[in-house]
Image (tube, rainbow, N blue to C red):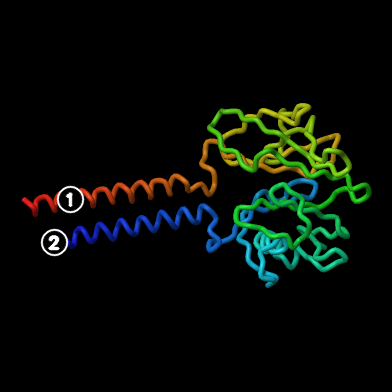
Amino acid sequence: MKKKFIASLLALVLMLSLLSVNAFALTAGNPSSPTVVYVTIANGSVVLAQQPVTVTDTDNDGNLTINDALYAVHEANFEGGAAAGYASENGTYGLMVTKLWGVTNGGGYGYYVNNAAASGLMDPVANGDYLNAFVYTDLASWSDMYSYFDCQEVEAADGTSFDLILTAINFYATPMQEPVAGATITIDNAPTSFVTDAQGKVIITVPHGIHVISATSTTQTLVPPVLTAYIGVPMAGDNSNLVLWIVIGAVALAGLVAVVIFTGKKKHEA
């Protein structure tokens, strides 16, 4: 009976250990786990904010790319799917977008991965990446400037303030990255009284819940930045505590098994 009990405990410890390893691997972005990319699309304003989408090799080129991610997000979120909202074709400089979120404007589109300019649609994407794609609103002088906050997500307690820094990329200036002064912060597309200072910094307070933070400017044509704020609620996808408790539980149970075996051994020797 004692042997069966010990065997059962050992099996349970092994199972929990495997669970903790698998959970950690998924958290760390194990290549065998699904590739999820957070996609934002803007057309003058934000039409889709950090939408998680599982990316598959839709064009069968053996890689997961920006093209695959944009196809997947349209297929899942645009009325009529990717056939109605998204198109790409080979041009002089390789594969290029010809339709984004239903807009066809002759090639005025941009896309950034983790706030870095992409060289083309065939650039790779990885699990946990943030992909921002946008339609140019100024097709004459191309004055649209990509802008971004210094973080992608914020988690804060109710009633607490936090600071953000807003930066824009200006290809016609040196250095290209510059702070955005005088920009009005928006919460869920509604303007607020929060305005960035000369260094692009602003301190804001956001009400309880999950909100999309962005910004507008009357002096610059900004591609709207996007940040998701989790105020008084846990950040989406945060399973780090679960992994920690699984590991602690497995270790504690292993200790219990060791005590049972040691006690049984002592009694047998006695």
Quarter of the N terminus within the rendering: bottom left
**Identity, as a three-letter code, of the amino acid under mark 2:** Met
N-terminal of the pair, mark 1 or mark 2, is 2
Cα distance in 3D space between marks 1 and 2: 16 Å
Q: Is residue 143 left or right of residue 270?
A: right
Spot occupied by residue 167 in the image (x, y as percentages of width and height): 75, 37
* Quarter occupied by residue 7: bottom left
Q: Residues within 10 Å of mark 2 (few under 14, many from 20)?
A: few
Query: Quarter of the image holding residue 175?
Result: top right
Residue 166 at x, y = what percent?
73, 36
Of badges 1 and 2, nearer the viewer stands 1
Pinpoint residue 22: horizontal percent, then vertical percent.
44, 58
Q: Residue at x 51, y 52 (%)?
A: 27
Would you place residue 130 above or below residue 204 in this image? below
Q: Is residue 138 left or right of residue 169?
A: right
Please tell me how crowded label 1 is: few (under 14), some (14-19), or many (20+) other residues with Cα within 10 Å.
Answer: few
Kindly identify which residue carries mark 1: 262
Picture disc at residue 1: 2
